[in-house]
Amino acid sequence: MQVFAQPELLVVDDDHTILSVLARRLSREGYSVRTASSGQAALKLLNERWPGLAIIDLMMPGMDGFLLSERIKQVVDIPIIMLSAVDASEAKVSALEHYAEDYITKPFDPDELVARVQRVMRRVPLGRSNIVLGDGLVEIDLVARNVHGPGGVQHLTRTEARLLQVLAASMEHVVMTDTLLDRVWSESDGADPSYVWVNVRRLRRKIEEDPDHPRYLVTERGLGYRLTSGARSG
Amino acid sequence: MGPASGPLRIFLALIIAAVPVLLLGVAAPLLPQMGLTGFNSSTTALILVAIVLVWAAVLAIVYSRTLRADLNSILALARRGRDPTDESGVPEGYRRVAAALEERNRQVAVLAAQSSTAPISGDARPTASHVTATAQRVTGDPTWRLAVMRTGNAELLPVGVYHGVELENPGTISELEQWASTAGDDPQAPVHRVEGPWGAFVIVRLATSDSLTAILYAPWEGRPPPSAAQLDLLNLVGQHASTALEHALLYARVRAQSEAIDRMAEVQRDFLRSVSHDLQTPLTSIQALAAELRSTKDADDAAIADLDDISFQADRLRRMVGQLLAVSRLEAGALAPRLEVLSVAPLVERVWRALRADRKFTLETEGAKLLAIADPDRLEQVLWAILDNAVKYSPEGSLVSVQLRPAADDRLAIAVRDQGAGMDADSVSHAFDQFYRSPHATRLAIDGSGVGLYAARGLMQAMGGEITLTSKLGAGTTVTCLLPAELVESEELVESS
């Protein structure tokens, strides 16, 4: 992998051991890490400068992870990885996905967190949250992860949403299969090109009228895939 | 005419009609001898016909009324076949029987309806009042009372006299009811009339269980003894009353028990959730710290081995806590898997490595390559539970094999086979029950909570999959998971453009 000057991370958790352990683990990966043990403390640090990514514990006394994420996103769109309890209710989880690029449930393997940080850092900025294809025949909401398409309203998996996000960032241009693998999956996922094929096939069932003859998500033989608006005028 | 019955009347009519013919038959040859000559055969025939006609006319006049009545009856019956509401011409006796039958049917229908709509609540008291009211309504006699003499649970159904009034508190049992419940020559008879110091009564003994004694009774002084039909009806009332009371008591008992069980289950769930939750953070820390220390350059080999053990045990503990949390989420109905496309083989390998088991291991993929549609974290939990069991219940050095193969309906089968102790049929049937551990497993003194397979099944179902287990004592166990899957076909091959 290419080596860049690693961006700064902010870790917010009320548990001091976790804070110090995660700070050390992430530093070892080359990230510079700042820590805060509460939402208020985090906001103070954020006033000084914005990190490249924030890792925030959902369950904190006082200002919880939701509130903090909301405050952050009001000001700047930095990626957030949420640390959540595995027994969080579904309502919480779906709300959480509004703010967080990713979340990882406690107890987690720190290596897994590193892998997720790396993937999120590779991600293309969320240039837009909506994609419109075929002059409005297909509308994709990447935040709510919904497709209003030929088959009615369909839910997108996280992977499908990421895939679309990466493709949409290069709208009308070919994205190589390897690039998709790199941007959509983290290393710990062990993905290979078949992951791309199958996810593309499943995506087509959701957005294409005739998945066997795709209009929007087009294969470029030997290269990769291209997302095209498929507008009749174009 | 006398009150002769129909066939007899017809027979008589025939005899009478035959009389002139017989007479003529006898008289005709005698006519010439009587000096009445000059009659040729045609004249004789004419006379015969005239006599028959006259006789027939006489008969017709005599019988016309009764014949008409019979004919009308027959016609009425025929009409009744077409129109059951038309009762004209049906003899009074038939009508009375039909009316009686109808009344009886109505009573039985009322009784049945009343019994089936008897209010069921945790309290059997309303049922007792209801049963009494039903007896009164069905017999048209408001003096019926229900005396509950003994009941298994006086809280649910108090002992006392029920008058059939809604929401009543039963009256106290007096000497009258004590006497009535034991009076009578035949203690086996469900319905009988008894006479004693309080006068005559009709008693209906309710056939109930050992814990419940109850009678329906009504004063019968100065009334004729109940007819056979009344006895039948009372018997029926008694049976319905018994059933209704027994059901109400049973229902109340079951409800009380299930409420207690629900409360216990809730306490258990809360406990499970909070304990597992509290364990999460320290576990994450321990694991991260051990990994951190292990990566420092100055650690010696012994320290590294220890740190590996710490990591291993922390990982094991983390997985077990994860299992408990999965159970608590499954039970709260709050587990929504995040389905993704994934390759199962690397996941199996990763879980197997995490187990660090001293067993031979094979992983083979048969048939076309499939990617499963599953939640990677949840599938890992399932695989860990199954493989952990395979290791726990098999001897060192034995083989644990995993086979991935296509299954029907676009699914992927993951079969995990061990050469371990196996299970008997009874244990197999309970293998997926929560906290179940087979006696054999317990005897082998192997640690285990009985949560693994229970959680695995719940997780598999949540992911739209299935899990099955086959086993034979001494011959190992095979656990098979079926998951929705997608066939891997290279886009290069599929796409024609």
Image (cartoon, coloured by chain):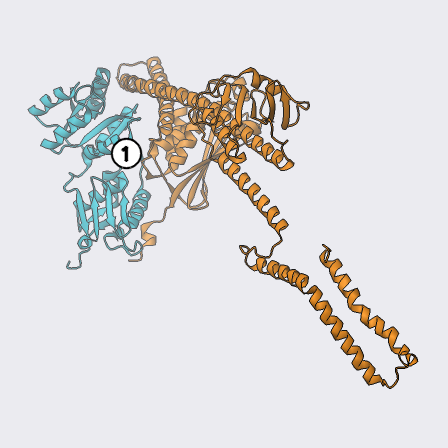
Q: Chain of mark 1?
A: A
Q: Position of residue B372 (x, y in %)?
A: 37, 40
Q: Position of residue B434 (x, y in %)?
A: 45, 25
Location of residue B151 with respect to A216 vertically, above or below: above
For this view, does B477 lie left or right of residue A184? right
Residue B111 visible somewhere in the drawing? yes
From the image, state the color of chain A.
cyan
- Classify residue B345 by image quadrant: top left
Q: Position of residue B487 (x, y in %)?
A: 38, 46
- Classify residue A24 by image quadrant: top left
* Label 1 crowd (10 A; few <14 / some 14-19 / many >=20): some
* Observer-nearest of B48 and A134: B48
For this view, does B68 lie left or right of residue B400? right
For this view, does B6 lie left or right of residue B427? right
Residue B434 visible somewhere in the drawing? no
Quadrant including the N terminus of chain B: bottom right
All told, the count of numbered labels is 1
Quadrant including the C terminus of chain B: bottom left
From the image, state the color of chain B.
orange
Considering every residue shown, the one lying at the far left of the view is A48
Kindly identify the residue that appears in the image at 25 percent across and 27 percent down. Answer: A113
Name the element at disc 1: helix
> Disc 1 residue type?
Glu
Considering every residue shown, the one lying at the far front of the view is B35
Q: Which residue is mark 1?
A: A187
Considering every residue shown, the one lying at the far right of the view is B33
Kindly identify the residue that appears in the image at 7 percent across and 24 percent down. Answer: A47
* Observer-nearest of A46 and A185: A46
* Observer-nearest of A84 and B267: B267
Q: Position of residue B384 (x, y in %)?
A: 41, 28
Kindly identify the residue that appears in the image at 58 percent across and 57 percent down. Answer: B80
